[in-house]
Amino acid sequence: MVVYLLDMGYESSLRGLDLSWHVMLGYAYENKLQRGTQIIFNYGPLSFIESGIYFEQSHVEKLLYRAVYLLTLGVGCFSVLRIRSVWALLAWCGLTLYLIMWRDVYLLLPALLLCHHECRRQPGNGAQLALSILLAFGAAFACLVKANAMFFTVPAIVLASIYRFTVRDYRPIVPVCFVLSTLLLFWLSGQELSGFFEFLRGYVDVSRAYNADMGLPAPWALHAAFVVGAAAVVAATLRLTSPASTVLSLLTLGYLLVAYKMGFVRHGEHPQAAFLALAVISAIQLWTPSSDVLGRNQRWVLAAVAIAAAAFVASSAVPASLPPYGDANKGFASVLQYRVRYLLDPTFRAAKDFEERRRFAVAFDAARSAIPFDAIEGPVDVFPFEFSLAYASGLPIATRPAFQSYFATSRYMTERNAEFLASPQAPRSVIFSIVPMDGRYAALEDPLTVGAYRRYYQVDRQKPDALLLTRRAHPLTQSQSCWHMQADVNQPLPVPAIRPDQAVWAHIALDPNWVGQVTSVLTGPPVLRMAVTTSAGRSDFRFLREAGEVGFLLSPTLGSTEAAARFFKGESRPEERVLSLMVLPADGLIPAFGNRIPVKLCVLSWAEGR
C-alpha cells in the first residue's frame, strides 16, 4: 500500500475548473502562502501532496511527505487490523487499488484506526501507547491535507479520550500528541504559528460553504443504495452494552455521515468516494478485535455490504483511466511495478522525471498561449477561475484569498476578497470573464468582489469571452438609496428602475426553520431557486442563500462577459435590467424556510472619485 500510493499520475494540462486549484496547491506550498490570510481554502498546508500537477521544485518533498503519511498509515493497518487469510489480504489490496482515485477516503483512516485501537489499549502497555501516538500523528497529518479529515478526526479523538477516562486513564497523552503534531506539521509546511486560528477559521468556513453551495446531485437510487448499505452496517455493529461498544458505534455513525457528505454533497456527480468509504468501514469492522462479538449473520451482512459497495466502485468508468498505466483489473500490478522501478532504477527514474518536466513545459506553454491579452501589467489575478493563466503569465500574482469563491461563497469569503481588493496588495490587472455554474445567478458568485471591481477597476481591453480590468488611480465614490420590504415566496417583487450607469443591489435573508437546519447538517441545505423577469421574459436560476444574505448585484443581469463589460462601463442596456424578482419554494417535501422573506433593495450610483 505504501509503495502503491507513494505518487500519483500527473495531468498533461494546467487549465480547467479543477486543474486550476491543483496548480494553486503546488504554487501555495512553494511560495509559502499563509493559510487564513493569503489563501482561504478547504485544502490545508500539506495539500500539495494531492496536487495532480507536477512541480519539479517540490516533487521530492511531496514524495517524502507522502511516504511519511503512508508509512504511518501502513503501520496502523498492520497493527490494528487482523488480516489472517489470503482472501482477506486480496480484499484489502482490492480496496487499496481505488484509494489512488478517491484519496479523501484514506485521509479518514488514521482516526478510524486510532479510535478502534484506543478502545482496546491496555494501561501501562508502552508498545500500544506508541502506536496510538503514531496514529495521532497520522491523524494530524490528514487534518492538514483536507478539511474533511478534520471534521471526522477531531470528534473521533474526543470519543477515544472520553473512553480512556471511563477506564480510569486520566493522562490525555493522545489528544496532546495530536495537537502538538498538528502545530509541528503546520510549522514545517511553512506556516506561521501565529496564524493557526485564522487558518482554522477559513478552513471551516470554506468547508461549510461547500456543503451549502455545491449542488451536484447524484441519482436518488444511489442515495438510497448508500443509505441501505449504511443502515445495514449500523444494524450489524450498533451496540450500547459497554463504553467501548458505545464509542465505536458513535464512531461508525460519524464516519458514515462524513462519507455521505464527502461523496454526495461535495462530489455528487461522482459518489464513488462514499461507496468506497462504505466498503472500507465494512471491511474494518470485520478485521478489528471488536469483531469478536459479531455473530455469523452479522459478519455475512458486513461482507455483503463491502462486496456490493466495492463492486459499484469497480464498475465505474473512472478507474478505466487509472494512472499512470493499466485499467481497473490490471491497475494495481502495473502501478506497483511502476512505483518499485521508479524507486530502485535511477535510469528509469531520471527518464520519467524528464518526461514529467517535458509534459509540464508543454502544459505551461499551452496555458501561457491561452492568456487572452498581451502586455499585461502585474500583479495579476484571474476571475472567476483559471488561476493557471496567472501562474503561466510569469508576472507577480495577487490572487484573491478565497480564490475558489466562484465554487462556493460565504460571507467571510467574499468579505475577505473585497477587503483584499480595497488594499494596497490588490492586483494591478484582472482577467475577468463570466462563467456561471450549476444554473446559478452569475452575480451570486463572490458578490462583493463584483462590487469591488466596479469601484476599483475599469475595462482596459475587451474580447468576446474576457475582459482586462486595470486598477483605477482613484476608486469611484458610491452612493445608495435603499428600501426594506417583506416578500412572499412564489410572489413577484417589483425591482426599481435604474439608469444605464446605476445598479440594484439585493439583500435577501432566508432563515431556515428547524427542518432546514437539520437537513443542512445531515445532507446539505435544500436547493433554492429564484426567478428574474426582464423585458426578454422570465429566467430561473439557482439561489445561494448566504450570498443572497450578504447582498448581490441583481440588476443589470450579468448573463455574459459582454454584459459585464457594459456594467463596469456604466452602459447597461434596457433588456439587461431586472423588472421583478421572485424567490421560489425550496426543494423538499417539508418546507425548510418560512414564507415571509425580508428583502432590502438598494439603487447604487457611482461617480468619479479623487
Image: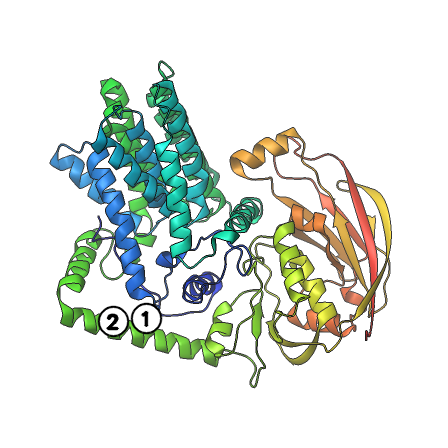
Question: In the rendered view of the protein, which quadrant contains the C terminus?
Answer: bottom right
* Percent coordinates x, y for residue 54 in the rendering: 34, 67
Q: Nearer the viewer, residue 304 or 483?
A: 483
Mark pair 2, 1: CA separation: 8 Å
Position of residue 4 in the picture relative to residue 315 (left or right): left
Query: Which element type, helix, strand or loop, lies under badge 2?
Result: helix
* Percent coordinates x, y for residue 372 in the rendering: 55, 79
Label 2–label 1 contact, CB within 8 A:
yes
User: Which quadrant of the figure has residue 168?
Assistant: top left
Residue at x-position 39% and y-position 59%:
48
Position of residue 544 in the picture relative to residue 61 (left or right): right
Q: Which residue is mark 2?
A: 353
Q: Residues within 10 Å of mark 2 (few under 14, many from 20)?
A: some
Disc number placed over residue 46 in the picture, else none = none
Residue at x-position 35% and y-position 44%:
105
Determine if residue 193 is in view.
Answer: yes
Q: Which residue is mark 1?
A: 56
Give the amino acid at mark 1: Glu
Q: Is residue 554 above or below residue 231?
A: below
Residue at x-position 26% and y-position 49%:
70
Q: Is residue 307 above or below residue 187?
A: above
* Percent coordinates x, y for residue 448 in the rendering: 69, 59
Query: Which element type, helix, strand or loop, lies under badge 1?
Result: loop
User: Which quadrant of the figure has residue 133?
Assistant: top left
* Percent coordinates x, y for residue 394 in the rendering: 47, 79
Comparing labels 2 and 1, the label whose residue is closer to the camera: 1
